[in-house]
Image (cartoon, rainbow, N blue to C red):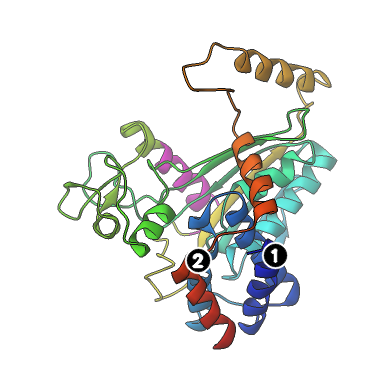
Amino acid sequence: MKHSNIEKIVKKIFLNFNLKKKHAEICAKYLVKAELVGAPSHGLARLKMYCERIKKKTINPNAKIKIKKISNSITHIDGNNCIGFIAADIGIKIAIKNAKKTGIGIVAIKNSGHYGLSSFYAEQAAKKNLIVWCFTNAPPAIAPYGSKKSLFGTNPICFGTPTGNKVPFILDTSVSVINRGKIRVAAKLRKKIPPGVALDKYGKPTIDAKEALKGVQLPIAGFRGSGLAWMVDIISGVLTGANHGGKVKDPFEDFTGPQNVGHLFLVLKPNLFVGKNYYKRIKENIKIIKKLPKVKGVKEILYPGEGMNARYKRNLKKGIFIQKNILEEIKKLNVVR
């Protein structure tokens, strides 16, 4: 299906659920873009969830977002339980603006929700010739090292930088072996998940996606991944005023109240320390790595962001494939509120 057509349908659905026109456009754009970059776990599979949360009043479709200026570089945003896309979109644009003026922009956000792929926001900053870090916390999925109970979210860490080329360097990774969205999609499609990804509720390894959702996900690199998840929980939750310590609500299953997710954006000018030499140095860095000897079957060593960009261009031309069950959900949402 052509991406522009599906974007119009998704926008209409959000309008039917009382979002403002501008906010509906932002949400539709980000959901469809997730499909275009090859991340359906963060795309249309989540549309029904957002609508359910609006319907059950755990997302505020007419949120009055509060923006508090702390200094010329630092801003604190209260999302008033809006869809995460909206608070994050406002936040990254303020961080970019502040960084352009002062050299650094920091925006902390509380009372938000799931904001899709962190790369959406990092890309905006990198394409404005800025370096960026994005952090956000998530519902319990990972057990702290030494515990058998999940508490940390998959808590993604994202970094972006301009490269002097058209394609920025964008690393967007969760601290779990795979993100929770992929497990949800696998469960919905009745597919298995890879081994070494999760444990069931009894603490035994499982490849059953539904059992994995009842159990715990495994962090990358053992106790190191657990430590990274903890770090992001502090940065995104403790620091911002959002929920933390396992209190972020599951957007698909817990409708007892708003999620109160936290985000933090740190944006800075690349010339702060090495002046205009930054672009020469980043190009040199990439060139060195791309020239390394390659293992059999590898045509080119790609830096993070190149693969995503290639998928985006390919899907922009050929259109978006939507799973039958997701298409049915969209049709129902487009007809009935």
Q: State the image coordinates of residue 4 (x, y, percent, origin top left).
A: 71, 65
Query: Which residue lies most toward the bottom here?
Result: 336
Describe the element under mark 1 as helix, strand or loop.
Answer: helix
Q: Looking at the image, which is closer to me, 56 or 236? A: 56
Identify the residue shown where x is 64% and y is 13%.
288
The 10 Å Cα crowd at callout 2, few under 14, some 14 to 19, many 20 or more, is many
**Magenta-drawn stretch, dominant element (helix, strand or loop):** helix
Queried whether the magenta region covers residue 120, the answer comes back as: no
Tag 1–tag 2 contact (CB < 8 Å): no
- The residues bearing labels 1 and 2 have C-alpha atoms spaced at a distance of 15 Å
Which span of residues is magenta-colored? 228-242
Assign the N terminus to one quadrant of the image. bottom right
Q: Which residue is label 1 attached to?
A: 26
Describe the element under mark 2 as helix, strand or loop.
Answer: helix
Q: Which mark is residue 81?
A: none
Left or right placement of residue 191 versus residue 37 in this view: left
Q: Is residue 69 visible?
A: yes
Left or right placement of residue 302 versus residue 130 in this view: left
Identify the residue shown where x is 48% and y is 22%.
297
Left or right placement of residue 212 versus residue 237 in this view: left
Identify the residue shown where x is 36% and y is 57%.
186
> Which residue type carries mark 2?
Arg
Q: Which residue is label 2 attached to?
A: 46
